[in-house]
């Protein structure tokens, strides 16, 4: 911690550097960077459908007409169907690529199995024994 009287002897560059360091420290402490997982199957077509669905929702919420509600419902169903098809297709592809590779299958089916992932906890149904043996997924 720097005393106020020490600031008077510092140059403008030193004060600017100190300001940046203190501000960065505060942001790191109170607003840490959060790593978000990307959904590997979510591409431009999914974004476009989501954008159109949200636009239909906004139209419905502006005037509450039954026609706009119907359009929004249809777009929601279409979006959910597309998301499901994309997700299932991605998983089927990953399973076929990792055929015979138990570790690869676990990474595909449960991302918490990746070592060092903070989302995994000891109370998880995916215990170390279950991950290592993989008896549930290899017996089918």
Image: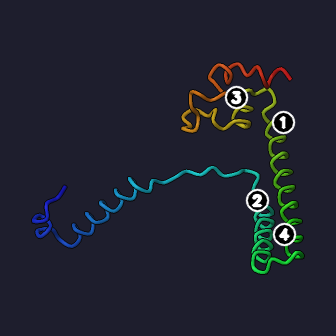
Residue that badge 1 annotates: 96
Q: Quadrant of residue 11?
A: bottom left
Q: Whole-Å distance between the Cαs marked 2 and 1?
A: 21 Å
Q: Whole-Å distance between the Cαs marked 4 and 2?
A: 21 Å
Q: Which label sits in the foreground, 2 or 1?
A: 2
Q: Whole-Å distance between the Cαs marked 2 and 3?
A: 26 Å
Q: Secondary structure at mark 4?
A: helix
- In primary-sequence order, the first of circles 1 and 4 is 4
Q: Is residue 101 above or below residue 32?
A: above
Q: Secondary structure at mark 2?
A: loop
Residue drawn at x 65%, y 19% as measured from the top left: 129
Residue drawn at x 88%, y 75% as measured from the top left: 66
Q: Give me the disc on residue 72.
A: 4
Residue that badge 3 annotates: 103
- In primary-sequence order, the first of circles 4 and 3 is 4
Q: Residues within 10 Å of mark 1 (few under 14, many from 20)?
A: few
Q: Which label sits in the foreground, 1 or 4?
A: 4
Q: Secondary structure at mark 3?
A: helix
- In primary-sequence order, the first of circles 1 and 3 is 1
Q: Position of residue 36 (x, y in %)?
A: 59, 52
Q: Is residue 105 above or below residue 61?
A: above
Q: Residues within 10 Å of mark 3 (few under 14, many from 20)?
A: some
Q: Position of residue 9 (x, y in %)?
A: 11, 68
Q: Whole-Å distance between the Cαs marked 4 and 3?
A: 41 Å
Q: Secondary structure at mark 1?
A: helix
Residue drawn at x 81%, y 36% as measured from the top left: 95
Q: Residues within 10 Å of mark 4 (few under 14, many from 20)?
A: many
Q: Which label sits in the foreground, 4 or 3?
A: 4
Q: Whole-Å distance between the Cαs marked 1 and 3?
A: 13 Å
Q: Position of residue 84 (x, y in %)?
A: 84, 50
């Amino acid at each position: 911690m720097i005393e106020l009287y020490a600031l008077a002897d510092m140059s403008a560059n030193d004060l600017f550097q100190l300001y940046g360091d203190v501000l960065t420290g505060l942001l790191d402490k109170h607003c840490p960077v959060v790593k978000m997982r990307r959904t590997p199957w979510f591409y431009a077509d999914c974004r476009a459908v989501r954008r159109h669905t949200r636009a239909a929702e906004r139209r419905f919420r502006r005037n509450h007409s039954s026609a706009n509600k119907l359009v929004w419902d249809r777009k929601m169903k279409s979006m959910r169907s597309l998301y499901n098809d994309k997700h299932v297709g991605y998983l089927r592809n990953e399973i076929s690529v990792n055929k015979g590779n138990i570790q690869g299958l676990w990474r595909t089916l449960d991302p918490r199995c990746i070592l060092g992932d903070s989302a995994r906890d000891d109370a998880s149904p995916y215990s170390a024994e279950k991950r290592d043996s993989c008896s549930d997924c290899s017996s089918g």
